[in-house]
Amino acid sequence: MTNGISFGAIFSAISAAIDPDLPATIHGDQVTTWRDFDARTSAIAAAAHAAGAVPGDRIAHLMRNSPAYLETTVAGFKARLVHVNVNYRYTGEELFYILDNSAAAVVVFDAEFAPLVASIRHRLETKLYLQVGGETADFAQDFDTVAATGATLPTQDHDPGDMLFIYTGGTTGMPKGVMWEQAAMWGNMRASANPGGDPPDSLADQLDNIRHGRGRNRSLVLPPLMHGTGMIIAISTLARGGTVVTVPGDNFDPEQAVETCQRLGCDYAVIVGDAFGRPLLRALDAGHGSIASVAVMISSGTMWSPETKAGLLRHAPAMMVADALGSSEGLALGMSAQTSANAGAPTKFIADGNTLVLDDAMQPVVPGSGVMGKVARRGMIPLGYWRDPVKSAATFVTVEGVRYSIPGDFAVVEADGSFTLLGRGSQCINTAGEKVFPEEVEETLKTHPAIDDALVFGVADDKWGQAVTAVVEAHGPVDADALRAHCRQHLAGYKTPKKIIIVAKVPRAPNGKADYAAARAMAG
């Protein structure tokens, strides 16, 4: 048994520690109190068990951001079911793959996805379908009706080893389910449960923190909850007795986001890099809303440029912006924090002693040596990939008796012990024998005043092996030659894109992650 606290134990006991009239979730004008949130999640958990789901079974979420997503998540924790996030952009076969791979016993889906689910359900062994909104399909039960039954769940033997899965986006193959023990996930979060004090060591400690409001936030979660960054911040917020604020709508609306932030006085916000940060900054510069109430804005999952951070800090001088290095396979790899005092400074990550940069011999890189290595994390890391021992062995490596997660990020360690992220090795371009990390070129392109976004990748080339190629999004007049000249001022010549295509919109997923396949198609 793993030591620590499970989310199931926290959420099953939280009603005894929190003011039931405080809001648990706010979605537009829809406010759910902790009293109702607790009752609804217990009823959904009871329905899952009544349908035959048992502890360890998987519960899949095919939903856009809404209170139902979070109610499903917490119901799963209470029922000892394993969270499975599903990308709502998946087609029929992609959806079948993830539901079949996870062997989901319960599937909760928005009404808009009912025809898609209906087209594949005969190939699945799912025990319960719950539909959110719309006219309920004949094979499903209505989510709100089930949540309002008042059914209770018998006491469960929650275990710190109870799991949750985070399925990867499938950018380097089929999506893989990263297996996290809940106690390990909570262990990466627990310092925020008692800011300035000792992290909770027991459930009683955490309930005492909740009772006294320690660590309570009103968190504006802007990425999709089906993406790890949004989901993790939402779970952490709720596990501290806070309030998760989500914004209605199928697409990210920066004006609505900053107006929601101002209206509700959110003190915490989570985004995913420049894909969210730049539109927010434009909305604020145009006079919409305010982020003045935000004490911390955090980003994870993709690079966040210093100039965007500096622009946001102009609108909230007391705010701290935190660039968190992490992935589905490893949390808390490193953190880069900026305030008004050092706005615009280069991004340097600081880590605790459990994050190392390892060279090819799996030894720590010497600070200041300039040697490039892979970022590795030990300690509270996942168990591996669900049903994929080969890829598990490649990512989760044991060296001299110590187990590491090595997601594939490359970095160099500076003389002061901080490290500079170079990029993800799977996207590295080999041009004429030189390695080019797309992220570095993308960030340089985005420093041009006419460029809003950029994606860089390699294209097969007879002369260079791979030719550095860029797809850029511009808001003003600019040509490829000017952009290449801009790159040459800041980068080595071989890193300058051989080909630059200017498009109306750089392709990205709803979670802000780069869609390199679509960008390559744009480049022909």
Image (cartoon, rainbow, N blue to C red):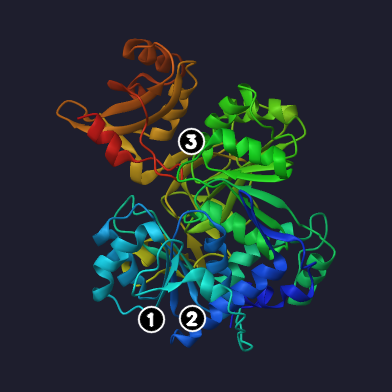
Where is 467 relative to 330, above or below? above
Which one is closest to the eye, mark 3 or mark 1?
1
Identify the amino acid type marked 2: Ala
Point 30% across, 21% down: residue:
500
Q: Quadrant of the C terminus?
A: top left
Residue 241 is situated, as x and y percent measured from the top left of the image, at 73, 63
Q: Nearer the viewer, residue 141 or 423?
A: 141
Residue 367 is situated, as x and y percent measured from the top left of the image, at 58, 41
C-alpha gap between disc 3 and disc 1: 38 Å
N-terminal-most mark, 2 or 3: 2
N-terminal-most mark, 2 or 1: 2
What number is the disc on residue 275? Answer: 3
Q: Is residue 365 left or right of residue 320?
A: left
> Looking at the image, do the residues carrying marks 2 and 1 touch, with CB atoms under 8 Å apart?
yes
Which one is closest to the eye, mark 2 or mark 3?
2
Query: To which residue does mark 1 refer?
Result: 127
Tell me, yes or no, if residue 299 can be seen here.
Answer: yes
